Image: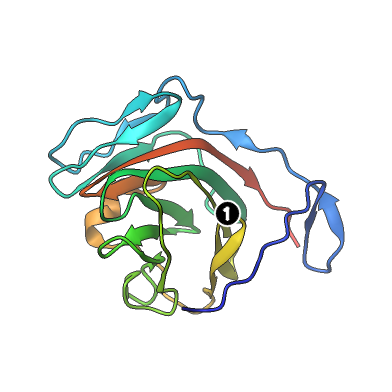
Amino acid sequence: MKARMIWAIVATATLVGSGTPAADPAWRSLFDGVSLGEWKPTGFGGGEDPTVVDGAIRITPGAELNGITWGGEIPRQRYEIELEARRVDGNDFFCGLTFPVGDEGCTLILGGWGGSITGLSCIDNRDAGDNETTDTMRFEKGRWYRVLVRVTPERIECFVDGEAIVEQDIENRRISVRAEVIPSQPLGIATYATTGEARGIRWRPLPSP
């Protein structure tokens, strides 16, 4: 397993290029815990539409994929997005978070390929099961995991419970999504043959360096 680095969270400042603290931008909620709001069923085909259950968005299995797509405004560069996600039932990925990277998109996979693979789909047309971001992690059924993705023009960083699982330089690299996940763009959450839940979904802009 690749070495992982602990991400130190600074509550009152965000470090920018020179290491100088900048004002911490406010988080902007994308889910109120009551209704889907701007989230719409992705329409992968098969399965029931996602619903809100006990303050979380529940995505049940589809024919293969099932999920939700955000229909509101969302940044495309220099931002962070955070949520909590868990696997309720099933043995494949419970969180396929598709997010914008400039004019393109990318997907963070948690628990794919039989339950443990993590990584980005796609880097230079290679998916999360077969590129330099590929890793493994044990996910407990029913446990909530805090997920954060940070996007800048230079790199994509992903954290689970404050632990870095992806630190991918993206300059001069092709960033894309797998063809079957295109309907999740620009921002979406999907599961594969698995019931997953998400809550606390929010984003914030990052200061320019």
Residue found at the very far top of the displayed protein: 34
**Residue placed at 41% from the left, 69% from the top?**
175
**Residue placed at 12% from the left, 45% from the top?**
63
| Closer-to-camera residue (91/197) | 91
Residue 176: x and y, percent?
36, 65
Residue 149: x and y, percent?
54, 55
- Residue that numbered label 1 is attached to: 161
The colour mode here is rainbow
Structural crowding at the residue carrying mark 1, measured as other residues with C-alpha within 10 Å and reported as few (<14), some (14–19) or many (≥20): some
Q: Is 110 above or below relative to 57?
A: below
**Residue placed at 52% from the left, 73% from the top?**
170
| Closer-to-camera residue (8/141) | 141
The quadrant where residue 106 appears: bottom left
Residue 158: x and y, percent?
54, 61
Q: Is 200 above or below relative to 145?
A: above
Q: What residue type is labelled 1?
A: Asp
Determine the secondary structure under disc 1: loop
**Residue placed at 44% from the left, 74% from the top?**
133
| Closer-to-camera residue (209/34) | 34
Q: How many labels does the image show?
A: 1
The quadrant where residue 111 appears: bottom left
Looking at the image, residue 66 sits to the left or right of residue 17; the answer is left
Quadrant location, the C terminus: bottom right
Residue 145: x and y, percent?
50, 48
Looking at the image, residue 23 sits to the left or right of residue 88; the answer is right
Residue found at the very far right of the displayed protein: 20
